[in-house]
Image (tube, helix red, strand yellow):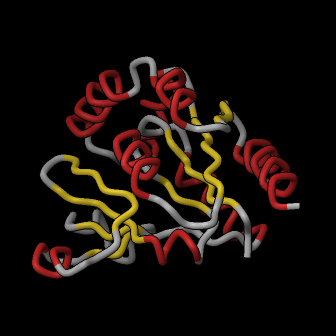
Amino acid sequence: MSKTIALFIGPSGSGKTTIAEYLVKNYDFTQIESYTTRKPRYDGEVGHIFVSNEDFDQLKDFVAYTEFDGNRYAATAEQVESNDIYVVDVAGAEYFKEKYKGSKKPIVFYFNLPANIRKQRMQNRGDPYQLIVQRMDNDERMFANVGNRLKAIYDQVWLIENYDVQQAANEIKSILSYANA
């Protein structure tokens, strides 16, 4: 079992989920699938456990919680203890710092790229134009001065400029291997 939990944070289109999936597939990491009341975007969507509002209300021991666009997202302490990576938003990371009392040391990886590249990535994955605009507007507010905010509450915050998935994943793997040695 690893000694760390990697928190992946960044604006839409920065590659958080892509890098997490790469690490899971190629390096035997495990990723938290957060609980959410959001409907799946497509059949077979991974990365979340889709539940009703009623089922969500029955969950206990949250260590991460956030709301976005009328939907709730959360992870439990048990999920953290049995996984290596958690893709989370800024509010979820702040909640995590306050609530998580487990044995794993959190290491934050902040993904950042210019807006034009993130926008192109969202277009390439088929996101509707209106959703892209909404996410970019939200991200502009949510990620204002985020590096300093995260550094104020977490001991380790690493900036990942994800222009190349394999290179970024190898950098993260190296950091986590050293931290877990």
For the N terminus, the image quarter is bottom right
Which of 24/72 is in front? 72
Q: Position of residue 108 (x, y in %)?
A: 60, 43
For the C terminus, the image quarter is bottom right
In this orientation, does residue 162 appear?
no
Q: Residue at x 63, y 72 (%)?
A: 30
Q: Residue at x 40, y 62 (%)?
A: 63
Q: Residue 63 vs residue 78: left or right? A: left
Q: Residue 5 vs residue 100: left or right? A: right
Q: In the rendered view, tell whether residue 97 sits above or below residue 140.
A: below
- Residue found farthest to the front: 101
Which of 78/33 is in front? 78
Q: Residue 142 vs residue 117: left or right? A: left
Q: Position of residue 151 (x, y in %)?
A: 57, 28
Q: Quarter-wise, where is residue 156 in the image?
A: top right
Q: Position of residue 89 (x, y in %)?
A: 40, 44
Q: Residue at x 26, y 78 (%)?
A: 59
In this orientation, does residue 95 appear?
yes
Q: Residue at x 68, y 60 (%)?
A: 4
Q: In the rendered view, tell whether residue 69 sits above or below residue 5.
A: above
Which of 108/103 is in front? 103
Q: Quarter-wise, where is residue 173 in the image?
A: bottom right
Q: How many marks?
A: 0
Q: Position of residue 7 (x, y in %)?
A: 56, 50
